[in-house]
């Protein structure tokens, strides 16, 4: 599932391509025909990401809410759209402006978990059920800590719970815990205020870098392939990481084999030596 940085990148990109424009909306697949009809011809005023949720705010207090889930994909392009291929839930197109007639774009959404229109109270309810998002300037990390500090639940499970922190997925959580030297099984209530302050700051830094680069890099300079004389990581997601999906491989810091375990149905990775604080 895409983590929050991907959704923030999409929101910024869609704002660049469509904000301030009148858009045409259609549902070639038919499953969002009614919603698309209501969006059709409205001006996209702005976009927003909140955790893993993408919001397009249209004139007339209409908000398009998209959650990609495991299989959702968004593609876009310039000019006239190609014939729809596959199950296109929503297609948005903009015409070029009078000043820039060639500046037309299209966007296709396939396979999302959520594609729906929300009223302003429904948008407020969505925000209220999500924890603070490290990528948002309005995030209040103390709201998350209020949950964490009184919970016996393992820290990794709390950080993956979108109602505690929004936008963090398995890669950011496993890597931030490694960098902090915290065991994923540490009960939330054992995390000190200073520990939370540092962990939040690291999530903000890692996720901000991921927005800039379009991939997740978590390895400090001293542990990069060139610095260590090791081969670069080969993985679909790209960036250099410490423990995520490296079970049995030597820890870049101490050489211990990286561990793998399951927590709440998710695979977790950690170094039993570097993350002994529990
Ligand atoms: Zn280690």
Image (cartoon, rainbow, N blue to C red):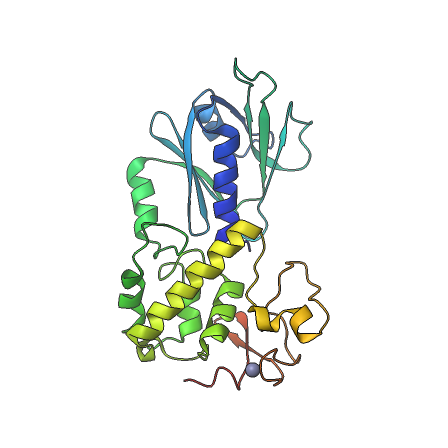
Task: In this rendered view, identify the residue nearer to me: 233 or 53.
Answer: 233
Q: Is residue 119 above or below residue 7?
A: above
Label count reads 0
Quarter residue 29 falls in: top right
Task: In this rendered view, identify the residue nearer to me: 246 or 74.
Answer: 246
Q: Say if residue 3 shows up in the picture.
A: no
At 51% from the left and 51% from the top, the residue drawn is 211
Task: In this rendered view, identify the residue nearer to me: 149 or 256.
Answer: 256
Compared across the picture, whether 175 is left or right of 153 comes to right
**Residue 209: x %, y % from top left:** 51, 56
Q: Say if residue 76 shows up in the picture.
A: yes
**Residue 126: x %, y % from top left:** 34, 47
**Residue 269: x %, y % from top left:** 56, 75
At 61% from the left and 77% from the top, the residue drawn is 252
At 46% from the left and 51% from the top, the residue drawn is 52
Quarter residue 58 falls in: top left
């Amino acid at each position: 599932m895409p983590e929050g940085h991907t959704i923030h990148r999409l929101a910024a990109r869609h704002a660049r391509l469509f904000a301030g424009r009148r858009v045409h909306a259609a549902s070639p697949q038919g499953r969002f025909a009614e919603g698309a009809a209501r969006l059709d011809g409205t001006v996209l005023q702005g976009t927003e990401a909140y955790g893993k949720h993408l919001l397009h705010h249209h004139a007339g207090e209409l908000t398009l809410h998209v959650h990609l889930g495991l299989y959702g994909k968004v593609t876009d392009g310039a000019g006239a759209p190609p014939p729809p291929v596959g199950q296109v839930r929503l297609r948005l197109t903009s015409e070029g402006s009078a000043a820039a007639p060639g500046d037309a774009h299209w966007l296709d959404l396939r396979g999302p978990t959520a594609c729906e229109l929300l009223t302003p109270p429904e948008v407020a309810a969505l925000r209220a059920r999500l924890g603070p998002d490290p990528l948002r300037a309005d995030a209040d990390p103390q709201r998350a800590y209020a949950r964490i500090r009184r919970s016996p639940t393992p820290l990794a499970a709390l950080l993956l719970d979108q109602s505690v922190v929004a936008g963090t997925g398995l890669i950011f959580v496993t890597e931030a815990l490694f960098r902090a030297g915290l065991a994923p099984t540490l009960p939330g209530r054992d995390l000190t205020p200073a520990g939370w302050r540092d962990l939040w700051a690291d999530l903000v830094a890692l996720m901000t870098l991921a927005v800039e680069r379009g991939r997740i890099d978590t390895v400090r300079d001293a542990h990069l392939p060139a610095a260590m004389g090791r081969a670069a990581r080969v993985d679909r997601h790209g960036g250099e990481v410490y423990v995520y999906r490296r079970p049995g491989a030597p820890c870049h810091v101490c050489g211990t084999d990286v561990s793998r375990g399951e927590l709440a149905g998710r695979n977790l990775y950690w170094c039993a030596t570097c993350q002994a604080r529990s």
